[in-house]
Each structure stands twice: as structure tokens, then as C-alpha cells.
Image (spheres, rainbow, N blue to C red):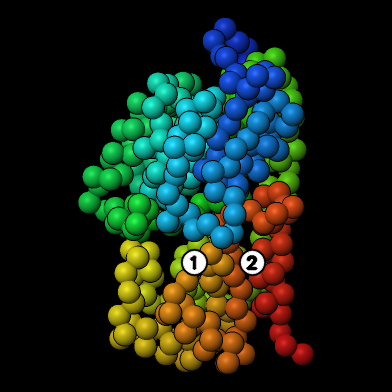
């Protein structure tokens, strides 16, 4: 559902679901929400405000989400929650194994990505408690059994799909609208606050889209090379052209060693293909990645690192705006 349409239905949703039973887990009456990463935790905090308590399972830049091993404490926190917000698409598949609470609502950000396999931009996405534990278990099992899913140390990558969907503000806008609807259904008394906060966040996300359009208009077939696809959704929106050899990215995504011939090919692309920028992941890396970064820096090619969690002191919008500005600076002509 389009964000603006979803937000316009918030008041109706609150009235319709006002009779639904909800018992906030927090002793002070606030809703308990668990997010798999601080990126999604920040979004929930902006919408929920003082009415929610948000726990982000992964919040440190020292934690690699692909290698995250949840604890028994995480399991307890998740099953005390009123709502869980995850990335989905195999990125944080561990959350499915934590849920034992019946009918625990789970929102997956990938369901708002129009290119998500088998999903059409949130069409027919559940807006009630049916999108809960049983359905979530089914979806997770499907992801594990799907022949297109590649197992990567607990991270089930779906071939051909870039699951780093938070680097697309339009996906975040859809998620934000859904979060507001869910919180309104759980806590109708504060639905107006959730709606107002979601509208304010939506305006900020629109501002990000304008920043992206402005920078995209200034790009003239800019070639970039990436060590992994963490920020590719953003660079694609900016009109940048990823020329990284597919075999290199496939090996990285599947957690395999990069074949020497593939690494050599990638280094040749870096040298010969007029690369303007190398984009890397600040939280993961390896010998191959370090080799590419070293060669880029020796050649005077700008290198930017992007993370999978929110930096301290930032909201999603301020963080993404800084990412866009950093890309703009890196592509400025050297005087």
C-alpha cells in the first residue's frame, strides 16, 4: 500500500480495531517493540514516541548482522513484545527461531520492496494480527527451503535480491506507515500521536527523496565498484552504475572465498573501467576487500564505507542524509 494512502487510513484503522484486546507488556503501560537492528528501532521510536519502549537486538557497529547469534535473553525479550519489526528476506532469519509466543505480530521491511520475490509492493499484506507467529514461521521455513536461498552462516541470502532494503527511503516510508497502523491497533488511545509522528517522518523521508533526485540529476554515468551490495539500493537510486563483476559479489554474498581469477578480474575493472568510487561495508570485510580498498586508495579513487546499523546520536533520516552528502562529496571533481 502506498504510504500516503496507508497514513490516511490510520484513523479508520484505530476506530475499526478499537475493540481488539491488547495488553502492553511494559509495567508502565507502554507498548514493547523489538527491532532486529537499530535502523528499524529508530523508526519505531520516532513513530511511537513516549508510548513505546523499543529494544534493538543489533545496535553496535562491532556486530556483524550476518553472524549474529541470539541469546536466551533475546528470546525472552522477543516473546514479551507486543510487536516485532525485522528486515526479513533471510537477512535476520534468526528472529523466526526466537518466537514462541502465539500470534505475535511481525512486520518485515522487505514486504515493502517492489522487487521482493513473490511479493508485489505490500499488496494484500496483512494489516491485522493474522500476520503473526504462525505465518511468520511459515515464511521463515519457506525461505530456508527455497532453492534460491543460499545459506550464509545463518544468513539466508535470496539469490538475485538485495535484502538491504533500508537504503531505499521509499521502502522505509511503507514500513513506517505499517508501524503506525500496528501501534494504533494495539493502542487506540494514542492513535492520533502515532499518526502525527508518522506524518512528520513521512515528510522527512520525502525530503530524503528530493536529496536523492537532486544528486541523481547531477550524475553522468558514474561507475562505482562495491565490495558487497549493502548500499547498492541507494547508489542505484542515485543513478550510479555498479560495474563490480557478478562472480565477486556472488562469492561475498554466499560467504565463500573469492576465486583468485575473480579477484584479479575485479582489480582489473578497478584499474581500467574509470571507477569514480569504491563502496564498502564498514562492518564486514576480508582479505579480498582489503586488497580492493588498498588498490583504490593507491590509485586515488575515493572509498566510502556504509554500515548496517545506525551510528550513535543519529535518526534514520539524519544518517541517510549524511550518507547522501558523503556520496556527493566523494564525487565532486578534484580542483
Q: Is residue 150 left or right of residue 56?
A: left
Residue 204's place in the image compared with 214, above or below, is above
Q: Which residue appears at 35% of the width and 26% of the height?
A: 134
The residue nearer to you, when weighing 272 against 186, is 186
Circles 1, 2 touching at the beta carbon (< 8 Å): no
The residue nearer to you, when weighing 138 against 225, is 138
Q: Which residue appears at 34% of the width and 77% of the height?
A: 258
Number of the label disc, if any, that sits on residue 284: 1
Residue 181 visible (yes or no): no
Residue 323's place in the image compared with 198, above or below, is below
Q: Position of residue 302 (x, y in %)?
A: 62, 81
Q: State the CA–CA distance, disc 1 to disc 2.
A: 27 Å
Q: Position of residue 111 (x, y in %)?
A: 45, 41
Residue 173 figure quarter: top right
Q: Position of residue 40 (x, y in %)?
A: 58, 43
Counting residues from the start of the chain, the first of labels 1 and 2 encountered is: 2
> Of tags 1 and 2, which is closer to the observer?
1
Residue 265 figure quarter: bottom left
Q: Which residue appears at 58% of the width and 31% of the height?
A: 33
Quarter the C terminus occupies: bottom right
Q: Secondary structure at mark 2?
A: helix
Q: Which residue appears at 47% of the width and 92% of the height?
A: 272
Q: Which residue is mark 2?
A: 216
Amino acid at each position: 500500500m502506498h504510504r500516503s494512502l496507508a497514513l490516511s487510513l490510520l484513523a479508520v484503522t484505530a476506530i475499526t480495531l478499537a475493540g481488539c484486546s491488547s495488553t502492553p507488556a511494559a509495567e508502565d503501560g507502554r507498548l514493547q517493540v523489538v527491532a532486529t537492528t537499530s535502523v528499524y528501532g529508530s523508526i519505531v521510536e520516532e513513530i511511537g514516541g513516549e508510548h513505546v519502549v523499543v529494544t534493538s537486538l543489533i545496535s553496535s557497529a562491532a556486530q556483524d548482522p550476518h553472524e549474529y547469534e541470539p541469546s536466551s535473553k533475546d528470546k525472552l525479550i522477543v516473546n514479551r513484545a507486543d510487536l516485532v519489526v525485522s528486515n526479513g528476506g533471510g537477512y535476520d532469519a534468526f528472529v523466526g527461531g526466537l518466537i514462541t509466543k502465539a500470534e505475535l505480530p511481525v512486520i518485515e521491511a522487505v514486504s515493502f520492496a517492489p522487487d521482493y520475490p513473490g511479493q508485489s509492493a505490500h499488496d494484500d499484506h496483512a494489516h491485522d494480527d493474522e500476520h503473526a507467529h504462525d505465518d511468520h514461521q511459515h515464511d521463515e521455513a519457506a525461505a530456508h527451503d527455497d532453492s534460491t536461498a543460499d545459506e550464509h552462516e545463518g544468513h539466508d541470502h535470496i539469490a538475485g535480491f538485495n535484502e538491504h532494503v533500508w537504503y531505499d527511503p521509499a521502502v522505509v516510508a511503507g514500513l513506517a506507515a505499517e508501524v503506525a497502523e500496528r501501534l494504533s491497533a494495539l493502542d487506540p488511545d494514542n492513535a492520533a500521536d502515532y499518526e502525527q509522528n508518522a506524518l512528520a517522518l513521512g515528510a522527512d523521508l520525502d525530503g530524503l527523496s528530493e536529496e536523492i533526485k537532486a544528486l541523481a540529476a547531477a550524475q553522468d554515468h558514474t561507475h562505482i565498484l562495491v565490495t558487497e551490495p549493502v548500499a547498492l539500493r541507494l547508489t542505484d537510486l542515485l543513478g550510479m552504475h555498479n560495474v563490480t563483476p557478478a562472480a565477486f559479489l556472488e562469492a561475498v554474498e554466499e560467504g565463500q572465498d573469492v576465486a583468485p581469477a575473480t579477484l584479479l578480474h575485479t582489480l582489473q575493472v578497478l584499474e581500467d573501467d574509470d571507477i569514480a568510487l569504491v563502496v564498502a561495508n564498514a562492518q564486514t570485510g576480508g582479505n579480498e576487500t582489503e586488497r580492493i580498498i588498498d588498490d583504490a586508495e593507491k590509485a586515488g579513487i575515493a572509498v566510502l564505507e556504509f554500515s548496517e546499523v545506525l551510528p550513535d546520536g543519529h535518526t534514520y533520516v539524519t544518517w541517510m542524509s549524511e550518507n547522501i552528502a558523503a556520496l556527493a562529496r566523494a564525487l565532486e571533481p578534484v580542483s
